[in-house]
Image: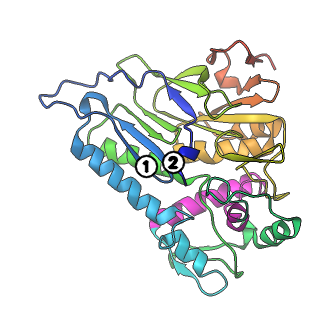
Amino acid sequence: MNPNQFHPVFTIAALALMPTVGVSCARPAPPRTDFVMGTVCTINLGKKGTEKLYDEAFARLRVLDALLSANSETGNVAEINAGAGLKPVRAAEETLTVLSTALEFSEATNGAFDPTIGPLVKLWGIGLGSERVPPRGEIDQALALAGYRKVDVNRTAGTVYLPEPGMRLDLGAIAKGYAADEIARLLSSRGITSGIIDLGGNILAMGEKAPGKPWTVGIRDPQTSQGGAVMSLQVANRSVVTSGIYERFFEENGRHYHHILDPSTGFPAENELLSVTIISPQSIQADALSTSAFLLGTERGLELVSRYPDTEAVFVDRDLGVRTSEGLRGRVTALDPRFVLHDDD
């Protein structure tokens, strides 16, 4: 992906402020930013940040990227895709975990979230530099290859089998969430209790900015990829992930085509929503739920989110109305008067 095509979803209002997590004799290293997992990633550990810690974290990100990327020709997911219709393929433990979790969300959404739409994602090419509106016949062929129930995950043997030639996994709607959780686990094992992990807008806020002071996260204007924060909320030990129509898209003949593809139609999802933001203790859950809830729409999306403990959501519709899950009512601050909070709905 061209890095210029990606625009982070969130503004971290407090990111420039170093969290107070203790005093060290060594001079802290500045936050590290690099391009990995197809996007711009930043990790900020404040006064606890060291070059060694940042090196470890980004090395782990690159390992996960190599394993899970659908666009790599040599990664584990690529190996599984290459074996479609031929044989079961040995899968790394990380791949098995992410795929198994993705399939759980497929069941929970009755297929609205489907990691087997890889042929469809490749066909549309959104964010890959090959964007186009495919002919209906090609879309139908790609849809015929999809179907999460076809995937054979053998945990005992440690293999994944795609039974039909041409099937293709794409874990892009969940991989960054898993990666953020993995980086948080790595940093926690090194004694880090506070920091921000920002994987292209997938935010994981470790601990608090300072004792008794949560992090402030801004939700961007979902009407434009260049917009600033229009709402804010405070979080601690939470991941905040948004899916919206402005993240990756292209326009053709005056129509806007975004990257969230609907497995029931083969086209970008069309409903009342501009974006969905999920706040959850687990980033992998927030990542998958943001896409799932967007595809389901506001009412069904709210019902889905309610099944997951300590998980909240913000839905922004095309009229700039904002609905939140019950636990967030009164906790979201509108920074732009165009966006109207409907907390009493």
Res. 27 visible in picture: yes
Looking at the picture, how far across and down is residue 326, in whole percent?
70, 24
Q: Please state, as top left, top right, bottom left or bottom right, where the N terminus lies in the image.
A: bottom right
Q: Tell me the SS state at disc 2.
A: helix
Name the front one of labels 2 and 1: 2
Whether residue 219 is situated above or below residue 185 in the rendered picture: above
Residue farthest top in this picture: 337
Q: Which residue is mark 2?
A: 3
- Residue 250 lies within the magenta run: no
Picture disc at residue 273: none
Residue farthest left in this picture: 25
Which sits earlier in the primary sequence, circle 2 or circle 1? 2
Q: How far apart are the two marked residues, 2 and 1, measured between alpha carbons?
A: 8 Å
Q: Which residue is mark 1?
A: 35
Residue farthest right in this picture: 136
Q: Of residues 323 and 260, which is closer to you in this image?
A: 260
Q: Which amino acid type is marked by label 2?
A: Pro
- The part of the chain drawn in magenta is 93-122
The quarter of the picture where residue 315 lies is: top right
Looking at the picture, how far across and down is residue 298, in whole percent?
80, 35
Q: Which amino acid type is marked by label 1?
A: Phe
* CB-based contact (under 8 Å), mark 2 and mark 1: yes
Q: Please state, as top left, top right, bottom left or bottom right, where the C terminus lies in the image.
A: top right
Looking at the picture, how far across and down is residue 130, in whole percent?
66, 60
Q: Residue at x 44, y 59 (%)?
A: 64
Q: Of residues 338 and 316, which is closer to you in this image?
A: 338
Crowdedness near tag 1: few (<14), some (14–19) or many (≥20) residues, C-alpha within 10 Å? some
Whether residue 237 is situated above or below residue 73 in the rendered picture: above
